[in-house]
Image (cartoon, grey):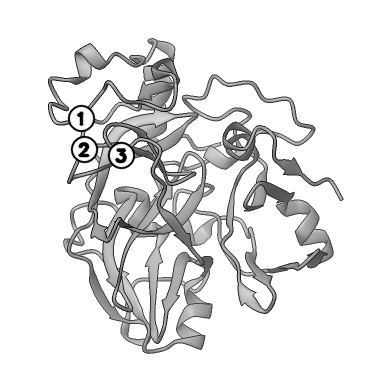
Amino acid sequence: MVISVLMAALCFALAAGTAAADPAVWRAEWPATDFSRHAVPYEEIRSGGPPKNGIPAIDRPRFVEADKADGFADREPVIRLAIGEDVRAYPLAVLIWHEIVNDTVGGVPVVVTYCPLCNAAIVFDRRVDGRALDFGTTGKLRHSDLVMYDRQTESWWQQFTGEAIVGSMTGRRLTMLPARVESFGRFRATVPQGKLLVPSEPDLRRYGITPYAGYDGTAWPFLFDGEYREAIPPLAYVVVVGDEAWPLDLLRERRRIVSGDLELVWEPGLASALDAAVIAEGRDLGAVTVWRGGAEAVHDTSFAFAFRAFHPDGILHSE
């Protein structure tokens, strides 16, 4: 199994006792954050290694039309977002190095996020009380999930839930928007003039290469010390819809699951971004779409441990 230099660094940080939460220490880096307000125990927040903005968000996204894009393989995963007639795709090959894109789609300010450690690809409306917030990375993790911050108040937000957990915004939630992870080939075939995010500085990172090679084949998530007692492995993929989840293996076996007004559909042809060093060569996870009453539903395909950590009373279906 290939473990990248970055993953080895994370292992070392964990073995060395990665710094736990300490607002007294954080204030030097976060003078504008109101640490008197928080919705979670501070001991659940850990340093992931990088400092504030050490993983740089994309604030001025650059796009090309999908049918004019070079350097992307058909099986590569992209986050597809459609608001009105504005349809865009954000390759995980880019997001895996940046984790956050601040954008405006169909006139709606959005933040497109990806946490590799949870495989959580989630899009939010970034307006709160009519004001558009801009997001960056804190360098912190909670339950192995990305903790973001907004630049307007420097409050900290949990990526998996969209909830502000530290600072003046504590308790507020961002609205999740329907989006899906599909292959670049499918996106290009269905929306050839759709906008595809491309690196503004192609030489800045090793785009197309994952620094998390082999991660989704490991036995335990990195920088996660919570309890996990489910029958399926903690890094098993699950399709999350609200406080319910279905194992991806179950959906792959059945191809289609109907539960109440939900319809979950699986089809092959989508590479894992967390398997082979070259993303396009990753094993076939398959793409998932979820519908509710004929409209695309908010959903995500992430890891079982993350679902259980953030939905302790949620339903993890076994059939």
* 2 and 1 marks in contact (CB < 8 Å): yes
Marks 2 and 1, how far apart in space? Answer: 5 Å
Ranked by sequence position, the earlier of labels 3 and 1 is: 1
> Which residue does the image show at 21% across and 20% down from the upper left?
26
Label for residue 169? 3
Question: Is residue 289 at least partly visible in the picture?
Answer: yes
Ranked by sequence position, the earlier of labels 2 and 1 is: 1
Quadrant in which residue 24 is drawn: top left
Binning the other alpha carbons within 10 Å of mark 3 as few (below 14), some (14 to 19) or many (20 upward) gives many
Which residue corresponds to mark 1?
A: 33
Question: Is residue 208 at least partly visible in the picture?
Answer: no
Quadrant placement of the N terminus: top right
Which residue corresponds to mark 2?
A: 154
* 3 and 1 marks in contact (CB < 8 Å): no
Q: Secondary structure at mark 2?
A: loop
Amino acid type, label 1: Thr
